[in-house]
Image (cartoon, rainbow, N blue to C red):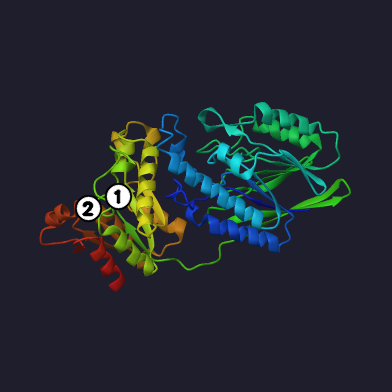
Amino acid sequence: MRIAHITDIHLRRHIPGHPTLPVRRGRTAPELLAAALDDARRRGAQLIVITGDVVDVPGYLFDPERDAARDGLAWQRVRADYRLVRRMLDDCGIEWIAVPGNHDSYRVHAEELGSGPFIRDVGKLRIVSFWDRESTGNVPRRTLTERERFDSSLLDPGTRPQVHLQHFVITPRLDEGYPHTYAEGEELQQRTSDSGRVVLSLSGHYHPGAEPTTIGSTTFSVTPALVEHPHPYRIFDIALDGDRVDAVRHTQVDLAGDAPARRAVFLDRDGCINTLPTYRHGPEAMQLLPAAAPALRLLRDHGYALIVVTNQSCVGLGYAEPGTLDEVHDRMSELLADEGVTVDAIYSSPVAGEHAVSDRYNVGDAPKPSPAMIRRAAAELNLDLSKSHLIGDRSSDIAAAQAAGVRPILVRTGDGRAAEQAWGDAPACSVVDDLVAAAVEVVGG
């Protein structure tokens, strides 16, 4: 039996914007999923399993205090992305099973991708799905009906070898930085291995993944995230002799080729793409500058990756929640999409240093004038800094560009005129009127 395991897709096509972590290439996820399904079909997979984070539902939509009526359009877009996944899976010609993860809407997932059966026989295997959830402190738990299904599956008198599917990690314990492993992970692993019934247990959630390990009669796999480079998934071959398992083997398929590094234009946000900061008034206050969309289209048409790098110490200073910042960025992306252009990624720094209200909100890349965001983007997105530019409206933008080794351009919008005046007769870089003029200089230079 050949099983293709795909996990952590974080798809956004109809939902505007990007996943919070820019290394997650959610806007290219439809193409990545299509490539994985096509590759699995060519390799003769008999079952596709997806273990969660199918769609990257914006976290702010789960806030219980939000106005549901206001969010009607947002939820329509979420549903449209699940329907896109459903069409792709139905069209691939292979039987499939998908369980949700912590970035999914369990309700919409159930309505669009189905909520069962949770126990399904495929070939000579019995596939058992678990829809576990995070508990206090984002710690995954197996409780209530999922616990009951687990208990009953281990006592199943049938002879079919079982494959267990869940989003969260059973083993190893991977809790550094975020609790990826179940609170009761050791107990789940011990009972699974000792049962003699479970041949394969598949998880996602931890994006780097972990090598499959066999404990007792069970192989446990934490498969890496499809949404992150090198865009992997895994093939599992279960060799059966009647009802007995001879062997479980795996192959990891990396979909990313050895593409050359891209040239990029890094863009400050406030005063460069949009007008004033909008954290005090939310996404409704987001307004693009007139030059923004035409300039970005010109740069995109000339093959530049478009990367926003923005200081947002308002989070560290306690003036805004991280979710508000995410929503503002999604609104910016929506407005740009209405003008026919998208950015490739958005990097933001919430860091406020010693003035931060809490260490919890003071974690991330150092803000400009540090080059940290630029360098991280280059590493995560395979960008060639020697062929790249930065456009900003403050001296801190220009200093960050120079420290990173990219060519800076100052625009006179936003705080640009004040920066130019402060330089006097010794400008630190080229100065132009607006983003269109900067884009013309980039493509002409």
Image location (x, y in percent) of residue 149: 72, 31
Image location (x, y in percent) of residue 77: 48, 47
Specify whether residue 199 is in view: yes
Between 374 and 348, the residue placed more toward the observer is: 348
Against 220, residue 90 (above or below) is below
- Earlier-in-chain disc, 2 versus 1: 1
Specify whether residue 406 is in view: no
Image location (x, y in percent) of residue 124: 83, 47
Q: Which residue is mark 2?
A: 394
> In the rendering, which numbered label is found on residue 357?
none
Do the numbered discs 2 and 1 sit on residues whose CB atoms are within 8 Å?
A: yes
For disc 1, the neighbor class at 10 Å (few under 14, some 14 to 19, many from 20) is: many
Three-letter amino acid code of the residue under disc 2: Arg
Q: Which residue is mark 1?
A: 368
Quadrant position of the C terminus in the picture:
bottom left
Q: Tell me which residue sits at (57%, 37%) in the image.
A: 106
Against 200, residue 25 (above or below) is below
Local secondary structure at mark 1:
loop
Q: Tell me which residue sits at (45%, 47%) in the image.
A: 21
238 on left or right of 357 = right
Local secondary structure at mark 2:
loop
Against 329, residue 432 (above or below) is below
Image location (x, y in percent) of residue 138: 53, 32
What is the distance, in whole Å, between disc 2 and disc 1 at their CAs? Answer: 10 Å
Between 291 and 216, the residue placed more toward the observer is: 291
Task: In the displayed orientation, state which residue is furthest to the left.
Answer: 425
Task: In the displayed orientation, state which residue is furthest to the bottom.
Answer: 444
3 on left or right of 272 = right
Tally of numbered tags: 2
